[in-house]
Amino acid sequence: MKPLQILLVGVLIGVSALCLVERRETGMLLVLGIIVAVLLLFSLTYRVMRWKRHPMAEEIQSRTLTWWWMIAVFMLAVATHRLVSFGFLGFLCFAALREYYSLMPMEETAESKVLSFKDRLSVLITYLAIPLVVYVAYIEWYELFIIVAPVYLFLLLPIVFVIQNRTEGAIKSLGILSLGFMFFVFNLGHCLFMINMGAFVLLYCFALTEARDLLAFWIGKWTQALVAKRPGALWARALDRRIATEISPNKTWAAGILTAALISLLSLAFVPFMPAFPDGRLTYSFGALVGLLIGLLGLMGDLVFSMVKRDVGTKDFGALLPGHGGVIDRIDSLIYTVPITFHMINWQYF
């Protein structure tokens, strides 16, 4: 990272910390400190790996540098004004939806996995739904927020197709469009309403989900090394049981479950700092359950979007984030963990 970039990242993190101190957000400040410490450790690690000419040094370096920027921007968004948080999260929904549509080129062809030029109006409607969802969440109109995408938008798009007098390719296009707005407008859009619960709830879900992705990588490497030592043993075969080899050849049930268990334990560290809800504070037992769900659903989100990438024939959804791929590559697990975390806490404490 160049000196100017280091300065800018430092300023962003510093401003976020000052805002948290002013608001007396002790929990968020502590989490920010831990995240910065972890990133400093990884920054030192990739320098040592590069010095030793380790084959993974470049990948760890690019991933770590991108993480610095993502953490700096995210913390600034959630630590400053509520309006900034909503603007940032709304843009995140837009960027993910746009990236998804970029893999579905509009071509006048009957081939699968592409949209038609006639779909431009429907695509525009899904984009316009984002500021509507942001506004509804901002004014805390929960009853409309929870139905605007899965009911009204879902019913509107087929009506648009009827007005266009379409038949050929209608089911294919409706399927692509429906998945897009359900994943990136509705599911991911739940992070908007999480702000209304408290910024720390959003940080809790984001931190555990991203920790799951990181732990899953290293635990997967560790279990593979164990299996390689005794490939014929019964315990080794159990550790090596794959989930979906056509989608992601190396992901195993053992690594996924072990990662989820660790995330469940890590969730307990957040419990004392969670805000007070209308029906009480988050208990350790409920926090462990939510952490376990984040661990398991994060794995499923990762696999679902690996399936999508396999289907459209691409390795990454984009190249916006060096070392990570595209926006969806970084938030795929969140699309599953955010709505479940929100509804679990909403059901129990609101």
Image: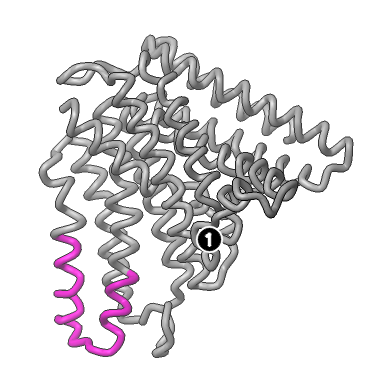
Q: Is residue 322 visible?
A: no
Question: Which residue sits furthest right?
Answer: 52
Q: Position of residue 255 (x, y in %)?
A: 55, 44
Please state the extent of the stretch shown in magenta in the rendering. 152-176
Q: Where 116 falls versus 314 (above or below)? A: below
Q: Position of residue 2 (x, y in %)?
A: 74, 35
Name which residue type carries label 1.
Phe
Give the labeled residue for mark 1: 317
Q: Residues within 10 Å of mark 1 (few under 14, many from 20)?
A: many
Work out whether residue 99 or residue 334 is closer to the camera in this orientation and state it: 334
- Where in the figure is residue 106, as x and y percent of width and height? 42, 79
Image quarter where the C terminus lies is: top left
Q: Is residue 291 above or below residue 240?
A: above
Q: Residue at x 55, y 60 (%)?
A: 248
Q: Residue lying at the far left in this picture: please name it.
A: 143
- In the image, taking residue 241 as reference, residue 269 lies left or right, namely left
Q: How many marks?
A: 1
| Quarter in which the N terminus is drawn | top right
Main secondary structure along the magenta-highlighted residues? helix
Q: Going 29% across and 18% down the picture, which residue do you hit? A: 275
Residue at x 50%, y 50% (from the top left corner)? 253
Comparing 238 with 32, the one in front is 238
Residue 157: say if magenta: yes
- Please state the horizontal and vertical placement of residue 53, each as a whole percent of the image: 88, 42
Q: Tell me what residue is drawn at x 42 percent, y 52 percent.
A: 300
